Amino acid sequence: MGDKRLSHFLARLLRHEAVSRGLDVTEGYVNIDDVLDQPEADGKTANDIEKIVRNDSKGRFKIRTHHGKQQIKATQGHSMPFESNELTPITHHTQARVVLHGTKYSLWPSIKSQGLSRRRRTHIHFAPGERNVTSGFPLGCDMAIEIDLNLALRDGIKFFKSENGVILSPGNSSGVISKRYFKQAYHLDPRENICLD
């Protein structure tokens, strides 16, 4: 297994599968020894995992030592529910200058009518701006939707900032952020506004 395959396996395991595989998950962290016991990690070492974390420019993983054991977690993107004290609540619109969701224009008709959905994840992901974005925008996105954070917060929608700077929201009680909170939408290249109506 090369570095890319190991990275994809870590993301899948730590975001979605650790609980269903019976691994002990504490605040999102899993013992690295338990990760290495998985069949997909055959022949890999703790050094291989440390290399993935060290070279990941998006900050998708974090390692800690807890009660003498090395542990790893994904910093966001989970579909497994767990409590985390490492998400910082955003309580005022001035805490995030801009809140952008990157997506594909082909999805715009559905998003415009149904809103942004967290789907099977615990949060909808946003980038805190477009320049030098390293996380929060998926690969291949060609448009962005800016959220009216002030209005959304006033209406009780919660937002958080993750350790690697991604802005996260569980959406409303149905896991959705409706079009009501879209401030603007635009194509990324070239920059061109998209009508919200």
Image (spheres, rainbow, N blue to C red):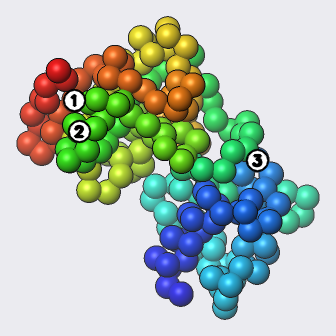
**Neighbour tally class for label 1: few under 14, some 14-19, many 20 plus, Cα within 10 Å:** many
Residue at the spot of label 1 = 185
Kind of residue indicated by mark 1: Ala
Query: In x, y percent, where is residue 138?
Result: 35, 52
Q: Quadrant of residue 192?
A: top left
Which of the labelled discs sits on residue 108, or is there none? Answer: 2
Q: Could you tell me how far apart the alpha carbons at marks 3 and 2 are, in whole angstroms?
A: 34 Å
Q: Is residue 16 visible?
A: yes
Q: Is residue 38 above or below residue 93?
A: below
Residue at x 63%, y 71% (from the top left corner): 50
- Which is closer to the viewer, label 3 or label 2? 2
Q: CA distance from mark 1 to mark 3?
A: 35 Å
Which residue is under mark 3?
A: 27
Return the residue nearer the eye: 151 or 86. Answer: 151
Q: Earlier in the sequence, mark 3 or mark 2?
A: 3
**Circles 2 and 1: CB atoms closer than 8 Å:** yes
From where the camera sits, is residue 70 visible?
no
